[in-house]
Amino acid sequence: MSRPKVFVLNAYHPEAIKLLNESDVDVVLPGGDASWHQEADGLLIRSETRITENDLALARKLKVIVKLGSGVDNIDLKAAKNHGVAVCNTAAINSEAVAELTMTLALCVSRRVVEMDRMLLRGRKLVRSSLLGQSLHRKVVGIVGMGNIGRAVAKKWIGAMEGSIVAYDPFVPNGAWEDIHHRRVVDLDELLRASDVLTLHVPLTDVSRGLIGKRELGLMRRHAILVNCARGGIVDEEALLDALEAKQIFGAALDALVTDPPTVKAYNQLLAVDNCIITPHVGGSTEENQAASGKLAVEQILAVLNGEQVDNRVV
């Protein structure tokens, strides 16, 4: 009996590949994956690979797709279900890494770190008295999305900054976060008006697409900072550009954008705004997290191919 064949369509951490090679499957690494539609029993992918209805219709042998990270909006989930293909992710394991970056970006905006670096690079004189930032100590942090990453952000902000937490999530049951001191609101507008830092941690869905637009930005405090380490499309990027240029809010940091990865061509206007930081969706990109996430992805694909149940199955 032939062994299952697992195609790795994107780069995975060497420790994950080592674990996969030591298992009872045939492995095809990136670069040798042209025939996956005909031969794959399992796929290991990242966010840069899209799996469409057409892909799934062609992949007659395919049994399981595992996506590194939590978001699965790059996979046609309805089509996967119709074709009997299991879809899994590695949700929760990257929470600490994304929470770290969220705090890092907020502090970089508040203390104008990138703005000063750009000024120095351009040969401009740095006058400290004209480069005042703002402290985030004991400020109000509004968290949209009360999942694993939102929880990690709340705990870090309280522990490091003695911050006050306001949380919003219409899909999480009452009683969530009982171990975290916070104020939960049922109206997003209330959170927007109260927050010194607004941070987004929700998946991209029909409900969340365009969640933060011109109206919502208009409700935010003039000294507020927006951080999006979730998904591109949740923030209306044109409305955000207008708000930043008009100094309607203090600044923004985007680790998730509609064009992923971001390019100078796509974001030349946002990159020209001093109080905006853009990073290429690297919330989970630490050595430790990539190793752990990759090994979890491998463990899941092997388990599904062996007919076992897994916790992170989406479809």
Image: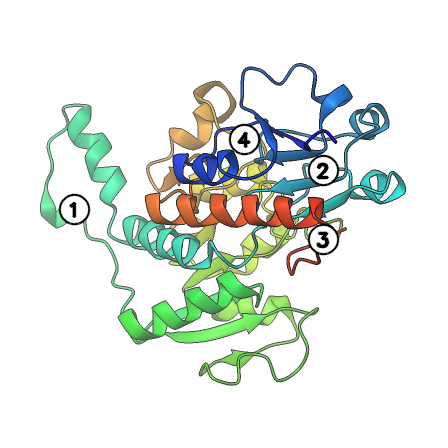
Q: Nearer the viewer, mark 3 or mark 1?
A: 3
The reply, left or right, for residue 300 in relation to residue 93 is right
User: Gap in Å between the C-alphas at discs 4 and 2?
Assistant: 15 Å
Q: Residue drawn 52% across and 42% down?
A: 240
Q: Amino acid at mark 1?
A: Ser
Q: Amino acid at mark 3?
A: Val
Q: Nearer the viewer, residue 48 or 212?
A: 48
Which residue carries the number 2 mark? 75
User: Gap in Å between the C-alphas at discs 3 and 1?
Assistant: 50 Å
Q: Residues within 10 Å of mark 4 (few under 14, many from 20)?
A: some
Which residue carries the number 4 mark? 260
Percent x, y of residue 207:
74, 54
User: Gap in Å between the C-alphas at discs 4 and 3?
Assistant: 23 Å
* Residue 309 versus residue 154 in the image, above or below: above
Q: Nearer the N terminus, badge 2 or badge 1?
A: 2
Q: Amino acid at mark 4?
A: Asp
Q: Nearer the N terminus, badge 3 or badge 1?
A: 1
Residue 230 visible at all = no
